[in-house]
């Protein structure tokens, strides 16, 4: 059963160039990440300098979101670059950049917005983004940041959770709601805001996920008109077009370190002189995880091909993301069944296998899964299985 992706000669040459460049430029603080996400604050600070070097090489942005503001990597080369960075726990450098650029690219890249796009693509600044678990379930009444208009300026009030691995953000990407009781498609505007405006305060948040998160409060923050992305009340549409296709699902990742580590551990760990991988039940579980990963790669290969040929991804990205989330949760279950209680020990316990990375994988699988079921809804609509919205009270019969 071979799930190996066949690379072109051009991709292989570019891979060699990337590997040589990373060997010469990768900071020693992140050289031994073993594919795990780089999350500690010291290393994150070092990564900001690495991001700027990537930007100077023109490697920080894929071609698609850069069409209006400059040429980025074509999909084939971006695939290879993402794989090499992701293998070192640094794939997020491209993921976070792509989200901001894709939002800006939807707008007229003029004036300040063009300078923002160039600064982000060149790696000079990072961007924190409002945490949005589901566009389908985006409720104006539950959104914590409100906006009112004062002449040409907008006034933001409220608070929200923002995600981003930069120690300090260059900009904040957020939605703000005009009418908490309005139609979601007409209730939001999108903004890209410098964090040093008067009235903004930033507070760290501790949670189960190791990914950094911050609660940001807006107290009568006056936002100039050039910070508005697109037109007023276009926020839902802008988020809809940029949120459903995360950068990672557009690329064929050959790295799946948690499963590779589990397979290696099972092969090399013995109980009473016998490898635990030789036990028939464990064998079946490990083979199931391997097959799930192969299916995940096929989904990613399809998405990569579709993007490279200009084919629109409608439900496809949701399909890939849903499979990845469910596969990660199933891998967590298999890890616990193969390793037993030791799978729950984190890096602080000297008995933890694989330096606690198995426990980290399980936490990431839980926090990265979509509790809202938005991906399932997208797929159901594409298959004609979604229930019809009830008719609004007061609407006229045809």
Image: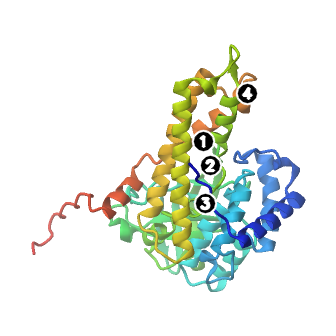
Choose between 122 and 234: the one closer to the eye: 122
Indicate the position of residue 210 as horizontal and vertical percent values: 65, 42
Distance between the Cα atoms at labels 3 and 2? 27 Å
Q: Residue at x 59, y 21 (%)?
A: 341
Q: Residues within 10 Å of mark 1 (few under 14, many from 20)?
A: some
Mark sitting on residue 209: 1
Indicate the position of residue 276 as horizontal and vertical percent values: 63, 23
Of marks 3 and 2, the one in the foreground: 3
Q: Mark 1: which secondary structure?
A: loop
Chain-order first, disc 2 or disc 4: 2
Mark sitting on residue 348: 4
Of marks 3 and 1, the one in the foreground: 3
Residue position for label 3: 252
Distance between the Cα atoms at labels 1 and 2? 9 Å
Distance between the Cα atoms at labels 3 and 1? 25 Å
Distance between the Cα atoms at labels 4 and 1? 16 Å
Residue position for label 2: 213
Of marks 2 and 4, the one in the foreground: 4
For the image shown, how many numbered marks are present on the structure?
A: 4
Q: Are marks 4 and 3 in contact (CB under 8 Å)?
A: no
Q: Mark 4: which secondary structure?
A: loop
Choose between 343 and 143: the one closer to the eye: 343
Indicate the position of residue 331 as horizontal and vertical percent values: 54, 38
Left or right position of 371 against 332? left
> Can residue 224 be seen here?
no
Chain-order first, disc 4 or disc 3: 3
Q: Residue at x 32, y 58 (%)?
A: 380
**Quarter of the rendering containing residue 252:** bottom right
Choose between 349 and 288: the one closer to the eye: 288
Q: Are marks 1 and 2 in contact (CB under 8 Å)?
A: yes
Distance between the Cα atoms at labels 4 and 3? 33 Å
Q: Are marks 3 and 2 in contact (CB under 8 Å)?
A: no
């Amino acid at each position: 059963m071979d799930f190996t992706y066949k690379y072109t000669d051009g991709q292989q040459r570019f891979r060699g160039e990337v590997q040589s460049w990373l060997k010469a430029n990768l900071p020693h603080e992140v050289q031994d990440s073993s594919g795990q996400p780089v999350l500690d604050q010291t290393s994150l600070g070092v990564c900001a300098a690495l991001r700027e070097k990537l930007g100077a090489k023109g490697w920080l942005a894929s071609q698609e979101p850069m069409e209006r503001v400059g040429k980025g990597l074509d999909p084939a080369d971006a695939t290879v670059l993402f794989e090499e960075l992701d293998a070192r726990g640094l794939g997020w450098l491209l993921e976070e950049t792509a989200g901001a650029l894709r939002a800006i690219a939807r707008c007229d890249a003029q004036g300040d917005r063009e300078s923002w796009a160039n600064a982000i693509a060149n790696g000079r600044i990072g961007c924190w983004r409002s945490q949005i678990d589901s566009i389908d379930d985006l409720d104006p009444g539950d959104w914590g940041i409100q906006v009112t208009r004062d002449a040409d300026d907008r006034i933001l009030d409220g608070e929200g959770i923002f995600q981003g691995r930069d120690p300090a953000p260059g900009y904040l990407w957020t939605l703000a709601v005009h009418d908490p009781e309005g139609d979601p498609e007409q209730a939001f505007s999108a903004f890209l805001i410098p964090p040093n405006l008067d009235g903004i305060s930033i507070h760290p948040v501790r949670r189960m996920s190791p990914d950094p998160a911050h609660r940001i409060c807006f107290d009568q923050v006056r936002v100039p008109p050039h910070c508005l992305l697109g037109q007023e009340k276009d926020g839902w549409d802008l988020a809809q077009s940029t949120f459903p296709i995360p950068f990672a699902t557009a690329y064929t990742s050959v790295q799946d370190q948690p499963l590779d580590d589990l397979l290696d551990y099972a092969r090399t760990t013995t109980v009473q002189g016998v490898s635990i991988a030789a036990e028939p039940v464990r064998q079946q579980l490990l083979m199931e995880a391997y097959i799930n990963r192969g299916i995940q790669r096929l989904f990613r290969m399809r998405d990569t091909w579709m993007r490279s040929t200009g084919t629109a991804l409608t439900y496809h990205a949701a399909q890939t993301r849903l499979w990845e989330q469910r596969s990660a949760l199933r891998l967590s279950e298999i890890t616990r069944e193969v390793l037993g209680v030791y799978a729950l020990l984190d890096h602080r316990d000297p008995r933890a296998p694989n330096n606690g990375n198995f426990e980290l994988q399980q936490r990431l699988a839980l926090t990265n899964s979509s509790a809202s079921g938005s991906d399932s809804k997208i797929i159901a609509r594409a298959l004609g299985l979604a229930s019809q919205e009830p008719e609004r009270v007061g609407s006229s019969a045809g």
